Amino acid sequence: MANKTPYTLRKRGESWQANLSPRVTGGARVQRNYKTKAEAVAGAEKELRRLRDYGRDYLNLSSEQFRACAEAMRILAEKGFQATAVTDAARYFVDHMNPEAQRRTVAETLAEFVESRRSAGLSPLTLRDYQQKLGRFAKEFGDRPIHSLITVEIERWLDKIDAGGVTRHDYRRHLSILYSFAVKRKYAAENIAAAVSKVKVAQKIPLVLTADDARLLLSAARDHNLGCMLPYFAIGCFCGLRPWELRRTNWADVNLTTKEVYVTPEACKTAQDRYVTMPDNLVEWLQLVPEPSRTGSLFYSRKDFDAVRNKNGLIDKWQGDIMRHSAASHLYAKTQNAPLVTAQMGHGLGVFMKHYKRTVSQADGDLYFKVKPTDVASAEASSGAVTLRS
């Protein structure tokens, strides 16, 4: 008959040996030596209780492994977790510490991401924006495996850079795009940036130039340094090109005969080229530029840019896209044709209505596109003060 006792005792010289039955250990050999028979019985009973409480897996744990488990539970307890959370911690570790992911740091993932976006045909402006914002993140965490970060680390980093609501929103969006890329490449298990708390950004009504503002601005541009910045400001005010697009526009792309400005894929933000129709008053401003000077790219220098704005007190009130906002808002007021405006500006209707449209009367829209070089005398006779719509 098979032995059904859970353990047996054997006298081994001056000591006693307790042997747990393979039937209860799952085939594992468990032998313990004790000084007395009573100690052997107590020890065997203790081992049986451990088997019932912890299962057979504990029999295979070494002393070092027992100590490691105890240390893990201590660490969890210090953070307020229950001891049983050690199992959840182990599962999280396995999910996030796969060997493939460990070979990709934040810096390596960013370099791979930017190259993939470049291959996808994104514009240099967009690529530069990614490199600027995400590069700052990589400067802080570049050597860390990208899968090893947690959401709270990103939130603390955003707090540390002391960013405003709009800037924080942009950083969060860029990081979420980077982590989505990492998840697709299996360098990270989840998009932890998407879990970062969103910031509610108050919608601000954009400032726009009035007809008088534009007249004074272009007058100052015409009179400053042989009118070197006049084309930049004139096309910005009446065609609404982005600052980056203006700097990458060549005179070869400006056709005064067909009254069109061609925005190349290299110049525009979305890498989608477009033609922008020039109003008649813009053509007159550009005709002030001597024909031999209409070569190469539109002139731009920060020093001259600031000098022109300074002449009429605009430098302290200027917004980055104020000329673009002005062109879009006045064109919509004049035409009441949103699809036309968005086609000219090179962005979607939702973007226009949210970020660019400023309520302007139709009469003001008409006046804006009637600002001509012949009006400069009346502008110079005015007080010279520039009033922005606030």
Image (cartoon, helix red, strand yellow):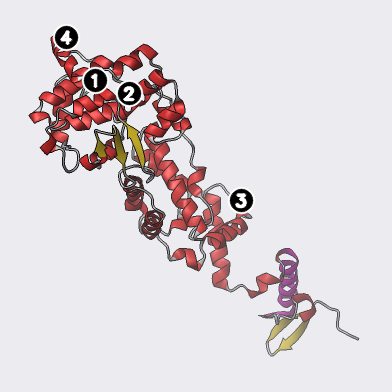
Q: Earlier in the sequence, mark 2 or mark 4?
A: 2
Asked whether the beta carbons under mark 1 and mark 3 sit within 8 Å of each other, the answer is no
Q: Nearer the viewer, mark 4 or mark 3?
A: 4
Which residue does the numbered mark 4 point to in the structure image?
Answer: 382
Residue 376's place in the image compared with 152, above or below, is above
Residue 248's place in the image compared with 62, above or below, is above
Name the mark on residue 29. none
Q: Is residue 99 visible?
A: yes
Which residue does the numbered mark 2 point to in the structure image?
Answer: 326
Which residue does the numbered mark 1 point to in the structure image?
Answer: 214
Q: Residue at x 42, y 59 (%)?
A: 145
Q: Nearer the viewer, mark 1 or mark 3?
A: 1
Any magenta on residue 35?
A: yes
CA–CA distance in space, label 1 to label 3 = 67 Å
- Looking at the image, which is closer to me, 38 or 143? 143
Specify the quadrant of the image occupied by residue 323: top left
- Looking at the image, which is closer to me, 246 or 114? 246
Callout 1 crowding tier (Cα within 10 Å): few <14, some 14–19, many ≥20:
many
Q: Amino acid at mark 4?
A: Ser
CA–CA distance in space, label 1 to label 4 = 13 Å
Which residue does the numbered mark 3 point to in the structure image?
Answer: 82
